[in-house]
Amino acid sequence: GGGGGGGGQGSGVHAPGERERESAAVSSSFLHPRSRSPFHPNSPLILQLVHLDDPAAVEYGEFLHNGKAKMTSFDAIRAEIEAETMKYLKAKGKAVSPDPIQLTVYSPNVPNLTLVDMPGLTKIPIDGQPKSIVQELEDMARTYVKGDNAIILAVTPANADLATSDALHLAREVDPSGDRTIGVLTKLDIMDPGTNARDVLNGSAVRLKHGWIGIVNRGQADIVAGMAMDKARAKELA
């Protein structure tokens, strides 16, 4: 995905899999990081983080589509994201919505930053999905990442071949100089026994101007168990 932040805010572009990290950015698991069903519709999510100077201020979110009603329950925010995406599916009969969901989160625990999370790219349609979904997802992502003010987080799982990474391929297409691209390596905890990601993280496997960052998100069991983001972060750093 792609994004531009106004008012001096930074902008970020997320490739597939980063909704978990956006949740971590506000220490609340309010973004559904993994769909319950392969047919769960997806849409771009524009997340604007606004820092509040009062350290005692209550965190809250506002959606553009519902009149910016103040929501202090992040469970309710997550449910609203799912409901809004499902609404498009029912209205249009499609698995992917090009219309972004726009959410602003106000908190003393976040920096001023705008993030955009895109639906995951795919090479093969899942049964029941139209063949056009492969190109639709790629075209949608391209419209966000091609902007010169977008920082691309090219997210790739550590247990996959980097040579076939859709995120890296798209990033190199729109940012051949690599000035706007940062590599993000996920799923470090489920690599094959006896292997490691050292060559990737030190840049000897695939060199990126701004390097690679390795992360470990919560597993599905952790998500179902409701593991808090602070505990997930501590587990990641252990």
Image: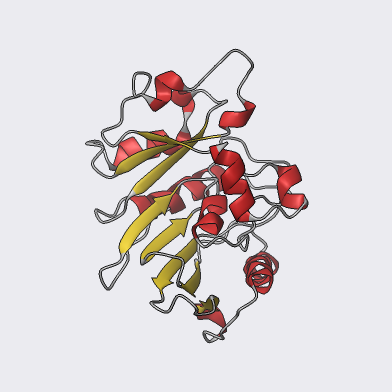
Relative to residue 177, is residue 193 depicted above or below? Answer: above
Residue at x 62%, y 47% (from the top left corner): 232
Relative to residue 77, is residue 44 depicted above or below? Answer: above
Depth check: 73 or 168 in front? Answer: 73
Relative to residue 14, is residue 64 depicted above or below? Answer: below
* Residue 92 x, y percent position in the rendering: 64, 66
* Residue 80 x, y percent position in the rendering: 65, 72
User: Does residue 46 appear in the picture of this structure?
Assistant: yes
Residue at x 76%, y 44% (from the top left corner): 221
Depth check: 123 or 118 in front? Answer: 118
Residue 33 left/right relative to 64: right
* Residue 40 x, y percent position in the rendering: 69, 55
Residue at x 66%, y 50% (from the top left corner): 34
User: Does residue 143 appear in the picture of this structure?
Assistant: no
Q: Classify residue 115 by image quadrant.
A: bottom left
Q: Residue furthest top?
A: 194
Q: Classify residue 190 by image quadrant.
A: top right
Residue 125 left/right relative to 8: right
- Count of all numbered marks drawn on residues in the image: 0
Q: Classify residue 24 by image quadrant.
A: bottom right
Depth check: 42 or 18 in front? Answer: 18
Colouring style: secondary structure
Residue 55 left/right relative to 97: left
* Residue 60 x, y percent position in the rendering: 54, 77
Residue at x 45%, y 72% (from the top left corner): 108
Q: Quadrant of the C terminus?
A: top right
Relative to residue 5, is residue 155 depicted above or below? Answer: above
